[in-house]
Amino acid sequence: MSLIPACEIGVWNAWIFMIWLLIQNFGVRLVSKDLYRRAGQPPDMKPSQKYKILSFISMPLWLLATAYSIFLPFELGTIWFPIGLTIFLPGLIMNVFATINFASTPMSEPVTRGAYRYSRHPIYVALLLIYLSVSIASASWVFLLLTALLAIEVSLSVADEEHYCLGKYGNAYREYMNRTPRWIGVPTSSSISNPS
């Protein structure tokens, strides 16, 4: 990793890994407005001030990371690229399956099938894997910093999303929370409080 961030337009740049996130985002938007609202902030969600601030921060971070990926070359002749590719592929696969699970679940039910059996937030896990893979494959400390900021934002905002799901889906979501970890490999908590 160099102290001076790499910045050059090229075919073999990090946008190759990041393009899936654009396809997923706009694909969901094109498939259904209701599905897109469900994926974002539903209209009936009453977000906390913290959630509003985090949402306000996350979009510029995502846009900045996506734009920077166009100018960020992969380190093709080094060990960094194969390591990054090895992290990217499971992230991409998880993202594809979690998006399909999300889109195929009726709006009146919580999403609990497929990738959602292993994590309550598999799309976020996949997103972070993809960002981490870009950081490693390009050996970029700038992108690693963006990944760390995104990880902090995601970890702080999921509580509001889960609170909303508890209010909307009730005991079905509570049971899901009790049997499914928030993050893959992290045990579930023994008790979940009632939404207020």
Image (tube, rainbow, N blue to C red):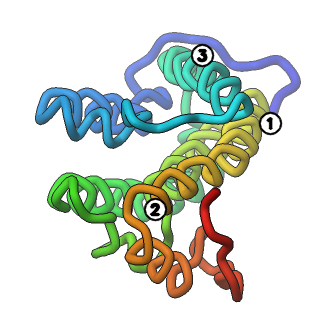
Nearest to the eye among marks 2 and 1: give it.
2
How far across and how far down the image is residue 24, in percent?
A: 28, 38
Give the number of the disc on residue 122. Answer: 2
The location of residue 184, given as percent across then percent down, is 57, 74
Tell me if mark 2 has few (under 14), some (14-19) or many (20+) residues whose alpha carbon lies within 10 angstroms of its own. Answer: many
Whole-percent x and y of residue 14? 49, 31
In what quadrant of the picture does the N terminus appear?
A: top right
Q: Nearer the viewer, residue 188 or 140?
A: 188
> In the picture shown, does residue 184 fall above or below 36?
below
Disc 3 on helix, strand or loop? helix
The residue drawn where x is 88% and y is 24% is: 3
What residue type is disc 3 on?
Pro
Q: Which residue is drawn at the image coordinates 53% and 35% (left, top)?
A: 46
Residue 60 — which label? 3
- Lateral position of residue 109 relative to residue 70, left or right: left
Q: Of the residues shown, which amino acid type is indicated by label 2?
A: Pro
Disc marking residue 1: 1
Distance from disc 3 to disc 1, alpha carbons, whole Å, reads 24 Å
- Label 3 neighbourhood size at 10 Å, few (<14), some (14-19), many (20+)? few
Q: Secondary structure at mark 1?
A: loop
Which numbered disc flags the more N-terminal residue, 3 or 1? 1
183 or 10: which is nearer to us? Answer: 183
Q: Nearer the viewer, residue 15 or 62?
A: 62
